[in-house]
């Protein structure tokens, strides 16, 4: 019998009872605290079974970036730009769940001859974001690098490609997502806010958080109705993913009622 698991179950029972009591109080703050306790307990459970999906998919409470890594029961932001006096910031799981993601900061450019410690090639950068709830496509990464003119460094392993700093990419990514969620940056009369975020719209059915983010983008989209009409007319091409703000299941339900 693993004592960590036994302790965790006992602690979980107490925590959930506390959460239920708080939720019963009814005030918004108590509700929020109750939600945070449940969420933190789920994060601890994940840590015990060796997955960290919840922690990885949370935006950092300070910089809003998807740069939280779990270590010793806390979530650490590995974004260099977020650190204070060179020291990494960290939160315990309950704080993390209670605070929620912070507002993304302006993109910081690091210009130095010597590469920072978090430089990576494109493959590793994409792998890093695949483990968060919002995977990034190669084309989105290329677009972010260009759009924010991110600094690059020589790649000694491959002369044809470059290295980029994870912190720079993560900051640009968070700023970009915040813009697209507000519909500012990419949505125009002819260009929907989902441009470049294909994966997000096709993996949305597997994950509630991604689904909510994708639907929010659809809400502000000037092409929403046209997109939905197309999906409904040519249903064969739209069996998966979100179109016009609806999931495949919701579209099927709509079809059956019309
Ligand atoms: Zn941070």
Image: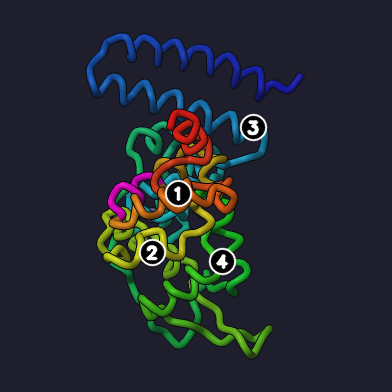
Query: In the rendered structure, which disc, 1 or 3, sits on the residue that comes first in sequence?
Result: 3
Residue at 46% across, 60% down? 197
Give the quadrant of residue 91. top left
Q: Position of residue 94 (x, y in %)?
A: 41, 31
Residue 171 has which mark?
Answer: 2
Residue 83 has which mark?
Answer: none
Q: Residues within 10 Å of mark 3 (few under 14, many from 20)?
A: some
Q: What residue does disc 3 label?
A: 48
- Image marks 3 and 2: residues in contact by CB distance under 8 Å: no
Which one is closest to the eye, mark 1 or mark 3?
A: 1
Q: Position of residue 199 (x, y in %)?
A: 54, 56
Query: In the rendered structure, which disc, 2 or 1, sits on the residue that comes first in sequence?
Result: 2
Q: What residue does disc 1 label?
A: 243
Which one is closest to the eye, mark 2 or mark 1?
A: 1
Q: Position of residue 145 (x, y in %)?
A: 44, 76
- Image marks 1 and 3: residues in contact by CB distance under 8 Å: no
Q: What residue does disc 4 label?
A: 125
**Label 1 – label 3 distance at C-alpha:** 37 Å
Query: In the rendered structure, which disc, 1 or 4, sits on the residue that comes first in sequence?
Result: 4
Query: In the rendered structure, which disc, 3 or 4, sits on the residue that comes first in sequence?
Result: 3
Query: In the rendered structure, which disc, 4 or 2, sits on the residue that comes first in sequence?
Result: 4
Which one is closest to the eye, mark 3 or mark 4?
A: 4
**Label 2 – label 1 distance at C-alpha:** 28 Å
Q: Is mark 3 within 8 Å of ligand 1?
A: no
Q: Is residue 26 left or right of residue 59?
A: left
């Amino acid at each position: 019998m693993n004592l960590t698991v036994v302790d965790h179950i006992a602690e979980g029972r107490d925590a959930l009872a506390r959460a239920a009591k708080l939720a019963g109080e009814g005030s918004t703050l108590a509700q929020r605290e109750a939600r945070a306790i449940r969420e933190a307990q789920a994060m601890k459970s994940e840590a015990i079974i060796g997955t960290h999906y919840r922690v990885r998919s949370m935006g950092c409470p300070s910089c809003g970036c998807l740069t939280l890594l779990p270590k010793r029961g806390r979530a650490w932001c590995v974004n260099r730009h977020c650190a204070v006096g060179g020291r990494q910031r960290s939160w315990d799981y309950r704080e993390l769940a209670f605070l929620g993601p912070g507002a993304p900061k302006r993109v910081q450019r690091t210009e130095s001859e010597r590469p920072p410690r978090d430089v990576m090639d494109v493959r590793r950068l994409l792998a890093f974001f695949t483990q968060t709830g919002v995977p990034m496509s190669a084309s989105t990464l290329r677009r972010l690098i260009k759009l924010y003119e991110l600094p690059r460094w020589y790649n000694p392993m491959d002369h044809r490609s470059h290295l980029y700093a994870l912190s720079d990419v993560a900051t640009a990514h968070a700023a970009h997502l915040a813009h697209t969620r507000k519909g500012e940056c990419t949505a125009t009369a002819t260009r929907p806010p989902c441009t470049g975020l294909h994966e997000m719209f096709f993996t949305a059915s597997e994950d509630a958080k991604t689904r909510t983010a994708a639907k929010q983008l659809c809400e502000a989209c000037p092409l929403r109705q046209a997109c939905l009409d197309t999906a409904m007319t040519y249903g064969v091409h739209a069996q998966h993913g979100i179109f016009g703000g609806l999931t495949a299941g919701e579209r099927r339900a709509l079809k059956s009622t019309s």
